[in-house]
Amino acid sequence: MRSTLGLVALLLTAAVILLLMARQTQHDVEAVRSVAFTTQPDVAPGVFDAKAADRLAARLRLLADQPQLPLDELREAAAQAASWTAALTPGTYDYHMAVNLRGAADELMATSASLSDPHRARARHFVEQALTPPGSPGGGPPGAIGGVRDQLQNLQQHRQEQAQDTDREAH
């Protein structure tokens, strides 16, 4: 009888612990979902166009293999992708695509004429990431966690663009 009561008490304790852990996990997931970063207040939101994004991905992939790069076109590409990110919801495939296209354009702006420049390899990687949906192999984490990762990357790209602008103005 005592062992049965002990077993029941142990099971009830385990059930309470599991219930509390489930609630904490649910709270943590909700906290991740609610994360929103104030990104670029100076970027006007633009309507995302999937066909234009596909064309931009193809163009950036082509430019990654060219020794001379059209910097004005790359600045426009980064600005276009930034405007898309300003209008999109993090955690979506479109947002993921826009952030990675922005990253690819920024990396190409930072590259040298050398075809083996590491910036070119990173630009190619960003283009591949842009074309790979989150949650699929090689596409990064899906959902809220992927959205937070993309937001952080978008902030990083914004900071990189600001640094490039500052360098350009100084020279």
Image (tube, grey):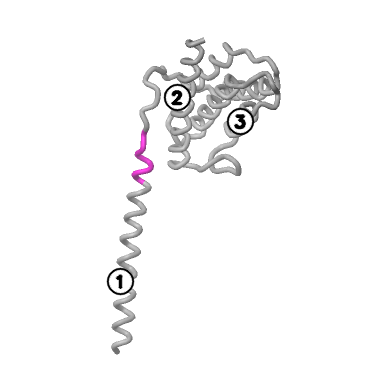
Q: Residue at x 50, y 15 (%)?
A: 167
Q: Residue furthest bottom?
A: 1
Crowding at label 1, few (<14), some or many (≥20) Cα neighbours within 10 Å?
few
Front-most of residues 66 and 143: 66
- Asked where in the image residue 70 lies, by quadrant, the reply is top right
Q: Is residue 12 above or below residue 160?
A: below
Q: Is residue 69 above or below residue 124?
A: above
**SS for dot 1:** helix
Q: Quadrant of the N terminus?
A: bottom left
Q: Position of residue 64 (x, y in %)?
A: 66, 23
3D distance between C-alphas at marks 3 and 2: 17 Å
State the residue lying farthest toward the front: 171
Circle 3: element type = helix
Residue depicted at 46% across the width and 15% down the height: 166
Q: CA distance from mark 1 to mark 3?
A: 51 Å
Q: Which residue has dot 3 on it?
A: 122
Residue flagged by tag 1: what amino acid is it? Thr
Residue visible at 47% across and 40% down?
146
Rounded to the nearest angstrom, the CA distance separating label 1 from label 2 is 50 Å
Q: Which residues are magenta?
A: 30-36
Q: Which residue is mark 2?
A: 159
In this image, 98 relative to 17: left or right?
Answer: right
Task: Measuring from the top left, give residue 2's x and y in whole percent.
Answer: 29, 88
**Amino acid at circle 3:** Arg
Mark closest to the chain's N terminus, 3 or 2:
3
Mark 1 = which residue?
Answer: 13
Task: Determine which quarter of the picture holds residue 113.
Answer: top right
Check contact, mark 1 vs mark 2: CB within 8 A.
no
